[in-house]
Image (cartoon, helix red, strand yellow):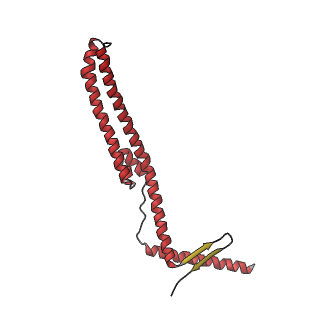
Amino acid sequence: MTGSLVKLFNFMLLISVLCLFFRGQISAAQPNEDLRLVSPIGAIGRSAVLPGWGQFYAHKRFLGATSFVGASGCLLGALITHQSFRNVYDNEYVPVALIDEKSPEALFQYNRANQRYKLRQFFLFAAAGVWAYSLIDSYVGANLYNAEAKANQLIDEMKRIEEWGVQLETTPTQLQLGIVKFF
């Protein structure tokens, strides 16, 4: 029993020394290399101010540009159709409706104005949908960017460890740790 305790103590000592060695090697290899992560809440805040800005912040430039152009286009369409609606309603429907609001001409002009009103509403709801998509996508994109950046950092660290010649093999019953160095 004492022999197994000594082996366990030696194993723990070996692991501690290796951890200190690798920790020193990793910190010496990357003295000022910090991982730059993206704040998901910051991405949402930016997209709330301007659609697509949070996606740019999360390094999704194409989707950010698409969201900005889509929301801007829908808002511009809503503005143009609103002006058309006001023009038809004020200049064509109201003068005819003041005479007789049940006349065929008044009903025709009302339908024209109503079509433009519905089209304006469609553009406004489409702009709101694109804006909501921008919010959600900026949050998801920031989290995906962070995960990818952390995975790439881990892969780089594993490559550096492999260069040192450390081998770690595990089976259900064994743990083998070895250092291979060629002189």
Q: Is residue 54 above or below residue 161?
A: above
Residue drawn where x is 55% and y is 81% of the image: 180
Residue drawn where x is 46% and y is 66% of the image: 153
Report the quarter where the N terminus lies.
bottom right
**Relative to the observer, which residue lies in front, 167 or 31?**
167
**Relative to the observer, which residue lies in front, 25 or 78?**
78
Residue 127 position in % (x across, y down): 36, 39
Q: Is residue 79 above or below residue 110?
A: below
Residue 53 position in % (x across, y down): 35, 49
The answer to whether one can see residue 145 in this image is: yes
Outermost residue toward the right in this view? 1
Q: Is residue 116 above or below residue 157?
A: above
Report how many numbered discs are placed on residues in the image. Answer: 0
The answer to whether one can see residue 50 in this image is: no
Residue drawn where x is 40% and y is 54% of the image: 58
Q: Is residue 148 above or below residue 133?
A: below
**Relative to the observer, which residue lies in front, 109 or 129?**
109
Residue drawn where x is 25% and y is 20% of the image: 92
Residue 85 position in % (x across, y down): 29, 27
In this image, 20 relative to 129: left or right?
right
In this image, 106 relative to 14: left or right?
left
Outermost residue toward the bottom in this view? 183
